[in-house]
Image: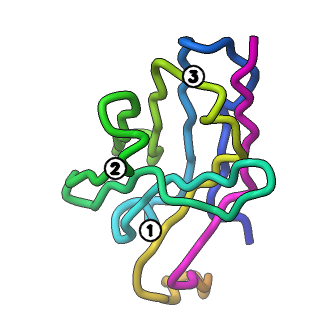
């Protein structure tokens, strides 16, 4: 079962911008804290930003003042607007949903920790 679908990655020059989007179901969007993580080449996955169902945001130091995470209730999407990109931002970016595991009325199981497939962001001149 694919619960999170990322889009918007690509290649951008230093100083440029990209907007990532994570599409999900209403069940996850309404009940899970959503976030973005990234895994740079040769490194471990690291936290970028999260947003609660109430809209409270939290950012890694490297993302603060450059990245903005937001929710769109009409589309059930969580976006990450990335500005002033640097080569150090090059990574595979993953959407994450964290909440209580559940089974909905259709019998679909939702784990407590859900990951998307990832989208590549490359910042290079």
Q: Where is residue 53? Give x, y as percent.
A: 27, 60
Element assignment for label 1: helix
Q: Residues within 10 Å of mark 2 (few under 14, many from 20)?
A: some
Q: Where is residue 95? Give x, y as percent.
A: 57, 55
Q: Are marks 1 and 2 in contact (CB under 8 Å)?
A: no
Label placed on residue 59: 2
Label placed on residue 27: 1
Residue sitting at x 54%, y 27%: 19
Please state the extent of the stretch shown in magenta in the rendering.
110-125
As displayed, is residue 103 above or below residue 3?
A: below
Element assignment for label 3: strand
Q: Is the C terminus in the top left, top right, bottom left or bottom right quadrant?
A: top right
Residue sitting at x 72%, y 51%: 118
Relative to 102, 69 lies left or right: left
Q: Residues within 10 Å of mark 3 (few under 14, many from 20)?
A: some
Relative to 123, 23 lies left or right: left
Q: Specify which label sits upstream in the sequence, 2 or 3.
A: 3
Assess whether residue 116 is covered by the magenta stretch.
yes
């Amino acid at each position: 079962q694919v619960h999170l679908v990322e889009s918007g990655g690509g290649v951008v020059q230093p100083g440029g911008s990209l907007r990532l989007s994570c599409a999900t179901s209403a069940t996850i969007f309404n009940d899970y804290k959503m976030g973005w993580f990234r895994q740079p080449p040769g490194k471990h996955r690291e936290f970028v930003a999260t947003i609660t169902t109430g809209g409270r945001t939290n950012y890694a130091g490297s993302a603060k003042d450059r990245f903005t995470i937001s929710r769109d209730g009409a589309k059930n999407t969580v976006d990450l607007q990335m500005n002033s990109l640097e080569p150090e931002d090059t990574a595979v970016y993953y959407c994450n949903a964290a909440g209580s595991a559940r089974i909905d009325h259709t019998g679909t199981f939702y784990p407590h920790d859900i990951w998307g497939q990832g989208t590549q962001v490359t910042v290079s001149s």
